[in-house]
Image (cartoon, rainbow, N blue to C red):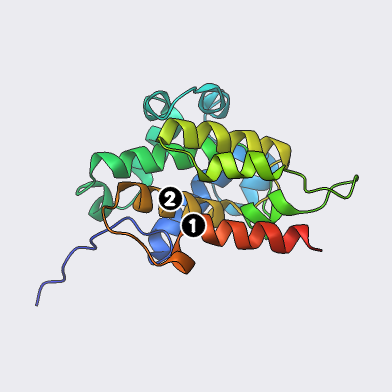
Amino acid sequence: MEQSKPTSFSIRHHSAVRYTLQRWWQSMVLSKDELKKTDIYPAPSGVKARLKRCDSVDSAMMTEGFRLLWMALPEAFTGQAKPQDIECWATIAAALVYIPAESETSFARAAGKKGDNDKSVVSEMRFAQLQAAKTPDEFLRRLRRILQQVKGKVSPLALAQDIEQWFQEHDSMRPHKADKRIAVQWAMDYYRAAGH
């Protein structure tokens, strides 16, 4: 009996996709010495910088950094990709280059964490603006701004899953249960972190 192809690019449910994404991210941020230990080739010079300079999801799609990620993903996924899948992965690539090191902290917890002045690192207003983003370009712009504020100290795989969920909700016509929506999950994590 022939196995059916997966129906989505779900990072959460496909270990091959997580593995590929992790290795791509490491090739972008780890030093040559660190990469030697992992048997990963470093990304070509300037690739990370070009991704960081992209001012839109479309421009991220046209970079070598995105192409390296996309071509490394399993063909079972890329062969059936829809335009919104490509937008999602370009956003993931353009965001993850702002994460300099591995962390266990979720994106929303990092944003809600108390800073030196006993206020959250990211203001409630800025976080709410991200949650209210209407377009992929606005989402990417606001996401990057927050990543810079938290100095990129977030889990790359967890952030990629959050971005993927945002795109699924953004492109979906069906309403989602409140407790399953990324905006609700982020708000809960943000306020939990702010409360500590």
The reply to whether residue 99 is in sight is no
The reply to whether residue 160 is in sight is yes
Residue 91 placed where, x, y %? Answer: 45, 38
The N terminus is located in which quarter?
A: bottom left
Q: Residue at x 35, y 38 (%)?
A: 87
Q: Is residue 108 or residue 103 the one in the foreground?
A: 108
* Mark 2, residue position: 166
Give residue 182's mark. 1
Q: Is residue 154 or residue 135 the one in the foreground?
A: 135
Query: Do the residues under discs 2 and 1 have CB atoms within 8 angstroms?
Result: yes
The C terminus is located in which quarter?
A: bottom right
Q: Is residue 125 or residue 59 the one in the foreground?
A: 125
Q: Residue at x 71, y 64 (%)?
A: 192
Residue 147 placed where, x, y %? Answer: 65, 40
Amino acid type, mark 2: Trp
Residue extending furthest toward the bottom? 1
Compared across the picture, whether 82 is left or right of 116 comes to left
Upstream in sequence: badge 2 or badge 1: 2
Q: Is residue 188 or residue 109 the one in the foreground?
A: 188
Residue extending furthest toward the right? 117
